[in-house]
Amino acid sequence: MIPHLLRPAAAALALVALGTASAQVSPSAASATPPPAGSPADVAPAPAPTFTSGGDLRLRNEYLNNAFSLSAVAARHEQDYFRFRGRLWFADAFAPGWTLNARLAAEPRLWEKPAFVSQFTGTGREMRYGLLDNLNLKWTGAFGLPLTITIGRQDIQFGDSLNWWLVADGTPADGSWSLFFDSVRATLEAPEIKTRIDLIGINQHARPDAWLPILGHLGPYSVVEQNEQGAILYVSNKSLPSVQVDGYFIYKKDEKVFAAGDNANLYTLGAKLGGTPSPHWQYSIEGAGQWGKKQDPMVRNPVNVGTLTRDVCAWGGNARLTYLLKDPANNQLGLVAEYLSGDDPGTTGKDEMFDILWGRWPRFSELYITSYIMETGGKVAQLNNLLRLGGSWTTTPVKGTTFSVTYNAMFAPQHTPTRMLNAALFSQSGGHRGQLLQLVLKRQLTKNVSGHLWAEFFAQGDYYARRDTMTFLRAELMVTF
């Protein structure tokens, strides 16, 4: 087993070495010979292209142990598979202020061990399907105003980069293959008051072929467990020196399609404060309250609520503090704290579980989001009932290479998860989820080739019935063109 698992890591390390060597001998773009005087480039600049295109190919080998099953003795507790995601895109600026954007994506997989997922339970090749994960029309300077309107399938994120909290991924059921929202977005810039206003309407369907045709056979696949509609009002202001103040209101309506889906009307009001009080310090603090109604048939503990519609009253918070040493290795030290309320099993008519809306993506862990499948009625990354406190260190030992170490201590405010699929996997008497360690090595091999090695280990605490270690290992190679 060990030699097999080390094959992707050895290959990636070899690529790192090759990339280092090539970086030492390849001339930079800045050293290219300039065109001779009098050439067309010297006489007049070339017009900006109206049509651009490109693509990328992402190759991944992922190994997980006990992550889905929460048990080292359960069937299919080990998962080993390859993911091959290819994407092609184009942007056509066909008229002043108007751009048409499109992107085609597909991700077949190769399973080395019997798959845990319900859509594909064997080994070998899983073809899935291809889809347009972006297709939108963008109008800049709409109505002669500092207004941009984008209509169609598009990616949307709010918050700090790679720490998007409640709006990041509209298609969590297909993993990180796609992130899109079928939506209309209007963005108004008001520079005189240093304010940006976003207004978004969302109409998301559980099946990816509801709005646009797909390539291949859809089969049992979905991008989310329910049809979702919603509206987002997000306002950002930078009037204060080195400070950004955000406020938002989010409405989300769910209509159940698959067994793990729900029916809900949720309202979320939140605010975020972030900034750089000095060159060495960065901070971000965000909080939100949530209310509404939800009908979730996966609530089965301590009693099965069936079709009962319950009042939602929940809240969450997320904070980060980073110290930048500003040294040659760009060392950075960070602290993080996050709280997401859980459903109190003693209040049958109320639901205190904070719903992270469109924030179901691997924000701080590729490993731990999979454990929530057994805890939240089959939904991956439906984080809730969580208190985590952690620290991190990031460094750049050589140009183009970064290494990070992150530790999180994890707790459960409510000892009994009300939506658990298998009660035998949870102690229902402990509040310590466990300890999460993450190690990541990233390398930019060439201008168009990058790769990383990623490892995570989670030691289960007394929140779980067992004390097994959960493991995630990944080797990735990304090529862009």
Image: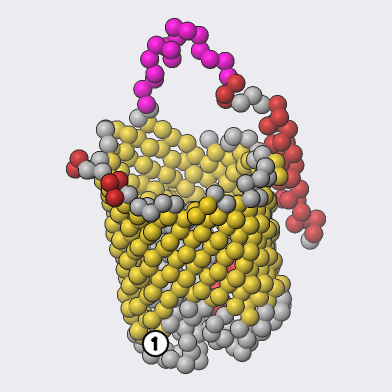
Classify residue 421 as left or right of residue 444: left
Colour scheme of the picture: secondary structure
In the image, is 426 to the left or to the right of 182? right
- Determine the residue located farthest toward the right in the rendered image: 3
**Quadrant assignment, res 439:** bottom right
Residue at the spot 60% in from the left edge and 56% down from the top edge: 323
Q: Main secondary structure of the magenta part?
A: loop
Report which residue position mark 1 lands on: 350
User: In this rendering, does residue 361 appear at all?
Assistant: yes
Foreground pick, 37 / 429: 37
Q: Which residues are magenta?
A: 32-48
Q: Is residue 42 magenta?
A: yes
- Image coordinates of residue 184 in percent, x first then y, are 29, 54
Q: Residue at x 66, y 57 (%)?
A: 393
Comparing 89 with 272, the one in front is 272
- For the point 67% across and 79% down, the residue is 461
Q: Can you say whether 434 is above or below 194 in the image? A: below
Mark 1 Cα within 10 Å, few/some/many (few <14, many 20+)?
Answer: some
| Residue 79 visible in the current orientation | no
Residue lying at 51% horizontally and 66% vertically, measured from the top left: 319
- Between 339 and 433, the one lying in front of the other is 339
Q: Is residue 465 magenta?
A: no
Expressed as whole percent of the image width and height from the top left, the position of residue 257 reads 38, 71
Q: Secondary structure at mark 1?
A: strand
Q: Position of residue 41 (x, y in %)?
A: 43, 14
Examine the rendered structure and indicate whether residue 232 appears above or below residue 23. Answer: below
**Horizontal and vertical percent for residue 430?**
63, 86
Position of residue 248 relative to residue 41, above or below, is below
Instruction: Give amino acid for label 1.
Output: Lys
Q: Quadrant of residue 97?
A: top left
Work out which residue is located at the far top of the displayed protein and give it.
38
Quarter of the figure that contains the N terminus:
bottom right
